Image: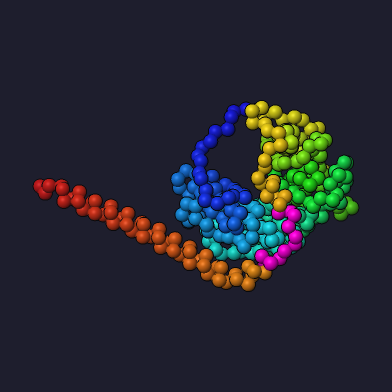
Amino acid sequence: MPRPKVCTTRKLKKKVGCLTFTPDERSLLLGEKSGYVICVSIDGNNSGLFQVDDEDAFLGHLSLLISVVLNKDGRLIGTCDRDEKIRIGRSSQPHVIESFCLGHTKSIFDIAFPDDNHLISVAGDGFIRLWNALEGVELDEIELAPHLNKIQGCGTDNETQDFLTSRLIIIGCTTVLGVRSHDCVIAVRLSNDFSVFVRDDSNDAVVSGVLCPKNERFVDCCVINHRIAEKDFEVVCMTEPLSRFVSWTFAYCKDSALEWSQMKEWNALPPELKAENGQFPRLQLLMETGKSFVNMSGVNAYEKGKEETHKRIKERHQRHQAKRKRQKAAVEEKEGEEEEREQEKTPIS
């Protein structure tokens, strides 16, 4: 496997807790722990979706920001925080809020768009929820604890721990969750139109999962090698304390069946990069977040000061627009002066 190459390096002013690429891969959206989202250029020119200056904060939460995502066409931006609040806004006008998705009772760990209009979230309350993102309406929910208990060996040593999911990935009509509290990876089946979670004849949600190797803790996971024709993909999982990689092939051949292959070693990490008892800042952030008590003060405070907050954001947006216009006018004026000087130098025949 080729070694990764560093394309660019940027030093930021504040600590970052989450990030995502824009669809054109020209910019990164970074969620600061302070609650703000900033746009950082990768190639020197920011994505056309966001008319903001480099490293400018264009939206914010009143609590610790946990995740920032974009929908498939990049028109909507979703953010979530520790205070059980999901915010849906417009990429072109970040100060305009389309909706709030409110329903979780504990800190939200991750969110993702399966398409342009729907959103899936998972939180410390042990529920995965499906939303109409534009309207902020909950369409379906699943309590995951009963399904985790059905996975052999899962939950027996972790029943006293709070539920903690550190990764949510959507591939087609399948939602993959990496569950740190139970050291497993589970898959949840979605309907083809993303309107509900699929259920079997007994009205149970179609959920299946696999455990991490014995005595190893789940850290993170990703999905690779998605073969649409064969209806399968590979889930790669990282565990600690030895930074070990394992993988399973996941098949969704039938509408109501999810199948996992036998686990295999995935020797992709060079030995010199393996570290015993490594540090994982994102996981640590979520673990600390999960310990917080249920606190709706952030939501209440936001609602109370929403009008003033929107006013400040709009004024800041207008100031940046005016600044860009002045800069453009200055450039045009300079070009005009240079053109006049060139014309003066040109001899008259």
The stretch drawn in magenta includes residue 80: no
Looking at the image, the residue that sits furthest to the front is 277
Q: In this view, does 55 lie above or below 236?
A: below
Looking at the image, the residue that sits furthest to the left is 349
The stretch drawn in magenta includes residue 292: yes
Q: Is residue 175 left or right of residue 326?
A: right
User: In x, y percent, where is residue 134?
Assistant: 64, 62
The residue segment tinted magenta is 289-299
Inspect this view and state whether residue 110 appears.
yes
> Residue placed at 26% from the left, 54% from the top?
336
Inspect this view and state whether residue 130 appears.
no
User: In x, y percent, where is residue 260?
Assistant: 80, 37
Relative to the observer, which residue lies in front, 196 or 144?
144
Q: In which quarter of the image is residue 222?
A: top right
Q: In this view, does 67 lie to the left or right of 164?
A: left
- Which quadrant: the N terminus? top right
User: In x, y percent, where is residue 300?
Assistant: 67, 69
